[in-house]
Structures are given as structure tokens and as C-alpha cells.
């Protein structure tokens, strides 16, 4: 497993992590045993980075990881654990980046995870009214207290990243990035590379569109996020299946799972890019891990981008409601 630095000053971590939102039943129910099996397989594959949040299942994802740490002595020392805070769940005030709220939420995460500190702590969503420099200062204070070894932000613009770095080194920015969502190439990826910030790419297989088994339309209707997401609403859903059929055919011709090809493409975008797919299936995890073993040639990359050129996806990546919080840019 290839390793890269987590930010300019951070430890070496695997250039592949797991996004643990799937453990909390976001895309269907996952049992603790299923989640632990995925974590066991990741450890066997020397994947060292686990990403979660206090809001994934109202803390359930963190609790599952905490029970796994407790059941596997030594696993914590082999793992960089990342979590997030800043989303309140309160419709009157959806985001809170105040120092007291952020520290209290981190304390709750530490308790659920059963750890004394996290290796990476993100602001999950920016509170628009609060200057990001102030929030960066709050994060620096948590590092000084030893509760977080490094800090980051999720779904911010490159201009916000540059402002935050005047107060603290931002080790990582988390953003959706894949062959179906290439917005980070319009300034964010470049800023991260320049500033020594890891670009942690969530949804790297396009919410299953970039796999051999995309979500059937019937299942899309059963999941809260997808049934209201523009890319999964007809006629966009069928158009996106048709577009990605070409990618699946290319992957088959290359003798690889489609998900592996999607992961390999992301890794080829630079050492600062770290994909964190989510899954509750060990079989699917094996396909994703295969992507870390593939070395794509320039002709391979050209072939991939020929079947899925920039802008191929039908529909925005978020609905108007889902866009509340992430920063738009360019």
C-alpha cells in the first residue's frame, strides 16, 4: 500500500482510506459485524486512514469504530482517525463553528471513539457568518490542547483555504472528487498541492455510478439522499447510467473492476489526493483496493477521460437543499 504524508507536517498514511459514513446506514443498514469485517480487511491491507463524523448516524459510526478499537488492541496505533464537527442538526441554526460548540462536539467524538485524541479534526461545514480565520484559530487551540494532531475543513473554496492557512496549517481539505465531479480541478486541487494540504476525495466512485453495479432506480427511491439528488432523478438517472456504461465496458476491456479504475484515476491526479470510498461490503472493498495497485499509463488516462469527459454527468451533484453549507466557487 502506497503511503503519502497527511499534509506538509503530518504522518505517513495510506493513499487510500475508508469513509465510514456507510457504517451508519446512510446507504442502507450496516450491522456492527459487517462494519468490523470491513475494518479488519482494511487493516489486513495496511490501510491506515479512517474518516468519520459526529453526525454519521448521530454518532453511530464513531461508536462502531470505537468498539473495533476496543476489540483490536494495537489497531489504534496503526490508524490515523479523522472526524468532523460543525453540523448541528438544528434547522434554526444548521452550522455552529463557535469555540465552545466545536470543542464540546470533539469531546463527544473522543468518548465515542474511545481515544484521547484524533489525528485529524475537520470543520464539517463552515458557519458563513463567522470569519474562517477565527475558526482556524479555534482549531489551532484544540491542537495545542492535544485533542487533535492536525486539522482541516470539508467542502470549502480555495480562497477560504488560503485565508485559513494564515492562522493554522490546514493538513487536509475534504471535497467530493471523482470522474463525475471534477470541480476541485478549478483551483482547489492546485491550492492544496501548493500549500502542502491533502485533498481527501469523498465519493470517489460517484455514489456507485462508477462501479459495475450502480444503484438500481428502485433502491435510489429508498435512500433519503439519492431520491432527492438531481443525478438520480429521471431522466438524469437513465442518462447517467447510459454514460457510465461506456466506462464499465472500458474497465471490462482492461480486465479491471470499474470501481478500481475510478480509484486508480484519482490516485493518478497527484500524491496529495487521497480517495476515501465508503462501503459496508468486504467484496466491494476488494474491488476498491484493487485501484491502489493499478498504475495507469497516459494512454490509459486518455482512454478513461475519452469515455467520461469533463462535464459528462447529467444533473447537479447536489439539490438546492443539499447545497446549503458547501462552498461554491468558480
Image (spheres, rainbow, N blue to C red):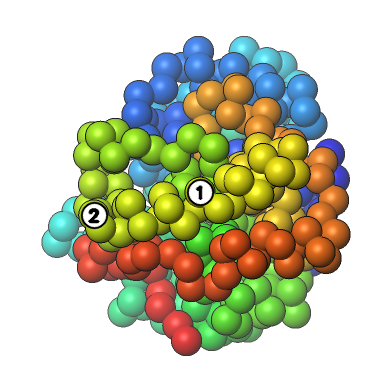
Residue positioned 50% across, 17% down in the render: 34
Viewer-proximal residue among 46 and 206 = 206
Examine the rendered structure and indicate whether residue 260 appears above or below residue 32: below
Query: Is residue 180 visible in the rendered structure shown here?
Result: yes
Disc 2 crowd, CA 10 A, few/some/many (<14, 14-19, 20+): few
Counting every numbered tag in the picture gives 2
Give the left or right position of residue 66, taking residue 192 as reference. Answer: left
Badge 1 element? helix
Classify residue 176 as left or right of residue 130: right
Picture layout, residue 180 above or below residue 112: below
Q: Which residue is mark 2?
A: 234
Residue 124 is drawn in which quadrant?
bottom left
Q: Label 1, on which residue?
A: 245
Which one is closest to the eye, mark 2 or mark 1?
1
Residue 302 location in percent, x, y?
73, 67
Q: Residue at x 39, y 31 (%)?
A: 24
Residue 180 or residue 47, whichever sits in front: 180
| Secondary structure state at the residue bearing disc 2 | loop
Report crowding for label 1: few under 14, some 14 to 19, many 20 or more residues within 10 A (C-alpha): some
Residue 124 vs 254, above or below: the answer is below
Q: Is residue 151 visible?
A: no
Q: Residue at x 67, y 19 (%)?
A: 40
The answer to whether 219 appears left or right of 250 in the picture is left
Q: Which one is nearer the viewer's eye here, 137 or 78?
A: 78
The residue located at (61%, 76%) in the rendering is 185
Amino acid at each position: 500500500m502506497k503511503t503519502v504524508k497527511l499534509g506538509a507536517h503530518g504522518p505517513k498514511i495510506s493513499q487510500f482510506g475508508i469513509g465510514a459514513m456507510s457504517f451508519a446506514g446512510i446507504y442502507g443498514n450496516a450491522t456492527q459485524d459487517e462494519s468490523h469485517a470491513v475494518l479488519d480487511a482494511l487493516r489486513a491491507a495496511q490501510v491506515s486512514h479512517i474518516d468519520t463524523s459526529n453526525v454519521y448516524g448521530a454518532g453511530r459510526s464513531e461508536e462502531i469504530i470505537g468498539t473495533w478499537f476496543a476489540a483490536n488492541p494495537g489497531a489504534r496505533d496503526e490508524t490515523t482517525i479523522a472526524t468532523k464537527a460543525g453540523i448541528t442538526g438544528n434547522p434554526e441554526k444548521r452550522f455552529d463553528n463557535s469555540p465552545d460548540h466545536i470543542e464540546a462536539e470533539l469531546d463527544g467524538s473522543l468518548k465515542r471513539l474511545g481515544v484521547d485524541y484524533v489525528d485529524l479534526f475537520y470543520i464539517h461545514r463552515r458557519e458563513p457568518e463567522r470569519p474562517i480565520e477565527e475558526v482556524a484559530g479555534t482549531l489551532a487551540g484544540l491542537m495545542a490542547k492535544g485533542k487533535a494532531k492536525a486539522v482541516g475543513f470539508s467542502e470549502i473554496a480555495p480562497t477560504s483555504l488560503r485565508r485559513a492557512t494564515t492562522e493554522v496549517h490546514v493538513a487536509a481539505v475534504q471535497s467530493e472528487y471523482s470522474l463525475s465531479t471534477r470541480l476541485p480541478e478549478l483551483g482547489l486541487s492546485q491550492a492544496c498541492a501548493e500549500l502542502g494540504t491533502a485533498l481527501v476525495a469523498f465519493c470517489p466512485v460517484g455514489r456507485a455510478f462508477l462501479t459495475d453495479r450502480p444503484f438500481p432506480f428502485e433502491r435510489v427511491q429508498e435512500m433519503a439522499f439519492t431520491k432527492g439528488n438531481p443525478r438520480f432523478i429521471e431522466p438524469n438517472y437513465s442518462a447517467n447510467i447510459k454514460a457510465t456504461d461506456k466506462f464499465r465496458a472500458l474497465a471490462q476491456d482492461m480486465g479491471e473492476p470499474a470501481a478500481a479504475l475510478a480509484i486508480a484515476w484519482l490516485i493518478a491526479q497527484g500524491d496529495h489526493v487521497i480517495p476515501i470510498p465508503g462501503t459496508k461490503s468486504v467484496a466491494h472493498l476488494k474491488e476498491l483496493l484493487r485501484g491502489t495497485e493499478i498504475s495507469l499509463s497516459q494512454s490509459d488516462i486518455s482512454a478513461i477521460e475519452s469515455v467520461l469527459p469533463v462535464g459528462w454527468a447529467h444533473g447537479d451533484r447536489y439539490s438546492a437543499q443539499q447545497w446549503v453549507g458547501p462552498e461554491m466557487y468558480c
